[in-house]
Amino acid sequence: MASPAALLCLAVAFLAGAAMAADPYAFFDWDVSYITASPLGVPQKVIAINKQFPGPIVNVTTNYNVVVNVLNSLDEPLLITWDGIQHRKNCWQDGVLGTNCPIPPGWNWTYNFQVKDQIGSFFYFPPLSLQRAAGGFGGITVNNRAVISVPFDTPDGDIRLFIGDWYKKNHTDLRKMLDDGKELGMPDSVLMNGKGPYRYNDSLVPAGIEYETINVEPGKTYRFRVHNVGVSTSLNLRIQSHNMALVETEGAYTMKQNFTNLDIHVGQSYSFLVSMDQNASSDYYIVASARFVNESIWTRVTGVAILHYSNSKGKASGPLPDPPNDQYDKTFSMNQARSIRMNVSTGAARPNPQGSFHYGQINVSQVYKLRNEPPVTINGKKRTTLSGISYSPPATPLRMADLYDKKGVYTLDFPTMPSDGPPVIRSSVINSTYKNFLEIVFQNNDTKVQTYHIDGYAFWVAGMDYGEWSENSRGTYNKWDGVSRCTTQVFPGAWTAVLLSLDSPGFWNVRAENLDTWYLGQETYIRVLDPEGGYNVTESVEPDNVLYCGLLKEKQKAQKPHASTSSSPPAVKQNDYLLAVLVSLVALAVVR
Ligand SMILES: *[C@@H]1O[C@H](CO)[C@@H](O)[C@H](O)[C@H]1NC(C)=O
Ligand SMILES: *[C@@H]1O[C@H](CO)[C@@H](O)[C@H](O)[C@H]1NC(C)=O
Ligand SMILES: *[C@@H]1O[C@H](CO)[C@@H](O)[C@H](O)[C@H]1NC(C)=O
Ligand SMILES: *[C@@H]1O[C@H](CO)[C@@H](O)[C@H](O)[C@H]1NC(C)=O
Ligand SMILES: *[C@@H]1O[C@H](CO)[C@@H](O)[C@H](O)[C@H]1NC(C)=O
Ligand SMILES: *[C@@H]1O[C@H](CO)[C@@H](O)[C@H](O)[C@H]1NC(C)=O
Ligand SMILES: *[C@@H]1O[C@H](CO)[C@@H](O)[C@H](O)[C@H]1NC(C)=O
Ligand SMILES: *[C@@H]1O[C@H](CO)[C@@H](O)[C@H](O)[C@H]1NC(C)=O
Ligand SMILES: *[C@@H]1O[C@H](CO)[C@@H](O)[C@H](O)[C@H]1NC(C)=O
Ligand SMILES: *[C@@H]1O[C@H](CO)[C@@H](O)[C@H](O)[C@H]1NC(C)=O
Ligand SMILES: *[C@@H]1O[C@H](CO)[C@@H](O)[C@H](O)[C@H]1NC(C)=O
Ligand SMILES: *[C@@H]1O[C@H](CO)[C@@H](O)[C@H](O)[C@H]1NC(C)=O
């Protein structure tokens, strides 16, 4: 037996080891406010972070603790959500209405989360009330730890590219259109890094628009991290005369594969390696154009940036590189998506290979088929539904309703299969259990591509095909090297099946990433309950600084508004404002 002294020594060594191994912290202080910008030549209010649009990049490494103090200098409630960050066992930091009370105007709230066992390229954005249509987004890079080898040489530089459709109308006007049952219509353009298109054609692009220039050195290879942060347009990305070697999808390394163009749907993120292997006879166009639309009508919905070699001999000129010529045939696009494979032999966040988890051999414990249908009218309002249910966020976050035993806030009756009953507005949630293995099939019965995102997890994209999904469709699943990601496209008249391992208790948002579809009700949550009562064991406890609202609002102490928002009303008024907002949300929730 070891002597007490030896045990003490061991304990000291253990403590020292623990201290040394403690994961580093990265701190951020963000002021989220409106600024005036003119991305399309006309001044408009956009949402900026520390006056930057797009916002700053959260550049951290696997296992870092990230602390972001968010001050809401807008005139409406705010949350920030971290698309793709898993907040393992800690949905309190997810920044959506099912887990967090919104930060009232003039208040701040500090997020504190760990990017545990993750690598990859993600983005954050304000998820409430269509705010993303006005900006507020920015990048998250989770670098791999130095001890883990990456399946490609270290690139010579890292380039961020936010692409997205954009309206000259602000988000409050867009919101009103949706509330009034109107469609948003054709966007005014596509922005790249918050800037309008390069004037590649005098009759198509007005003068005086500031465009994005990416400066590069000949012979070097750069990693482009690209995110579609737009409202609802699928975009085709291409770089004139350059191959784009795809290497990452939302936190998983893929088999390296060259594309001359790739469709990037709303909410999706990709990393490409691009070699500057051309002779720079001129600058090159970087193009993101609207997909599956009549291009002769949608010409203005095209983002154009410039790739500028340091030895460039002149400006880019002439026509843009051609998009795929298949407006009415989405086969090319689906085949592109299906060709993306995970590199199962490489490490990522951990040294063991990405393919060590054999997702294809696990027995599925629950199957959900979620059907998207064209918008419907419920109670005289235009709404969107998933499996006939149009979600309405309750005033009390779902996770808090559970913790404080508030009954009736939501229902656990989300149907496993779409029903033929009349569509309803309801706060209906998927009932699941810690360690279950879920199969979710998204079936798109509408005529537009949709993308779906699940918070808290990466899922395996097992299959995607045209027609109606049936049990026989499982025969076509990729059970070996399907790509792991958090946002998948679902083509019209087609289905996409994903598999996920529920290793993290909490409430996790499932939603359409297309903002109009989401805003009108297309979302739900998965309640992942640990039947052993895992609170504080398998799940993190409520954070000290938690905000209360809805049925718990009397627990919330008023915050002294921040000095920089002196024009905002006193705290008690803000509580009233928040209450008004929440009351209106409750009003929406009334069924029938
Ligand atoms: C991000 O962090 C990594 C690792 O610390 C560093 O090498 C890189 O230069 C940083 N990138 C940016 C854009 O700041
Ligand atoms: C608001 O910010 C201050 C520091 O500026 C911090 O001490 C406080 O904890 C923050 N409040 C919340 C609820 O995060
Ligand atoms: C897959 O990963 C391995 C190990 O890092 C690497 O050697 C190989 O090049 C990668 N394959 C592809 C096609 O990217
Ligand atoms: C949006 O624009 C409308 C006018 O079209 C204006 O009344 C409203 O205040 C604007 N909202 C914001 C947040 O700027
Ligand atoms: C500019 O676009 C218009 C409309 O598509 C087209 O007719 C014209 O040829 C283009 N001009 C150039 C220089 O490409
Ligand atoms: C991919 O593109 C790169 C750069 O253009 C090129 O060097 C490489 O040979 C291409 N690989 C394949 C498999 O085509
Ligand atoms: C290289 O540049 C010349 C003009 O300077 C051009 O004519 C030629 O096509 C270019 N070659 C390639 C491979 O891009
Ligand atoms: C695209 O729109 C143009 C202009 O309205 C129309 O002439 C053309 O027929 C349309 N093309 C297709 C393929 O529908
Ligand atoms: C899956 O289910 C089958 C049949 O019930 C069973 O034989 C098998 O052991 C299960 N596999 C796993 C990995 O649990
Ligand atoms: C939720 O699922 C659990 C485990 O399957 C079950 O025991 C419970 O009754 C379900 N709750 C509801 C409301 O359906
Ligand atoms: C929608 O569903 C109906 C009924 O099952 C089917 O006839 C129709 O083809 C579907 N449309 C699409 C676009 O999936
Ligand atoms: C959670 O567990 C820790 C460690 O056992 C304990 O210190 C803490 O008081 C617990 N917190 C709650 C809210 O139960």
Image (cartoon, rainbow, N blue to C red):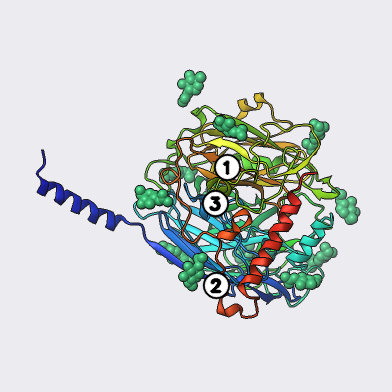
Residue 215 on image: x %, y %: 56, 70
Q: Which mark is residue 283?
A: none
Q: Is residue 138 visible?
A: yes
Q: Nearer the viewer, residue 283 or 142?
A: 142
Local packing at callout 1 (Cα closer than 10 Å; few below 14, some 14-19, many 20+) is many
Please determine whether, in this image, residue 341 is positioned above or below residue 87.
above
Which residue has dot 2 on it?
311
- Label 3 vs 1, first from the N-terminus: 3
Q: What amino acid type is highlighted by mark number 1? A: Ile
Query: Which one is earlier in the sequence, the residue at label 1 or at label 2?
Result: 2
462 sits left or right of 354 in the view: right
Q: Quick one: SS at disc 2?
A: loop
Q: Residues within 10 Å of mark 2 (few under 14, many from 20)?
A: some
Mark 3 vs mark 1: in front: 3
CB of mark 3 near ligand 1 (< 8 Å): no
| Residue 84: mark in rendering | 3
Q: Secondary structure at mark 3?
A: loop
Residue at the extreme front of the image, as rendered: 554
Compared with 559, 176 (above or below) is above
Dividing the picture into quadrants, the one containing residue 339 is top right
Disc 3, disc 1: CB below 8 Å?
A: no
**Element under label 1?**
loop
Q: Amino acid at mark 3?
A: Gly
User: Toward which corner of the image does residue 421 lie, by quadrant?
Assistant: top right
Whether ligand 3 has any atom under 8 Å from the Cβ at mark 1 is answered as no
Q: Residue at x 76, y 37 (%)?
A: 493
Q: Is residue 319 left or right of residue 66?
A: right
| Label 2 near ligand 7 (CB < 8 Å) | no
Residue toward you, 166 or 94: 94
Residue 440: x and y in percent read 62, 36
- Give the labeled residue for mark 1: 340
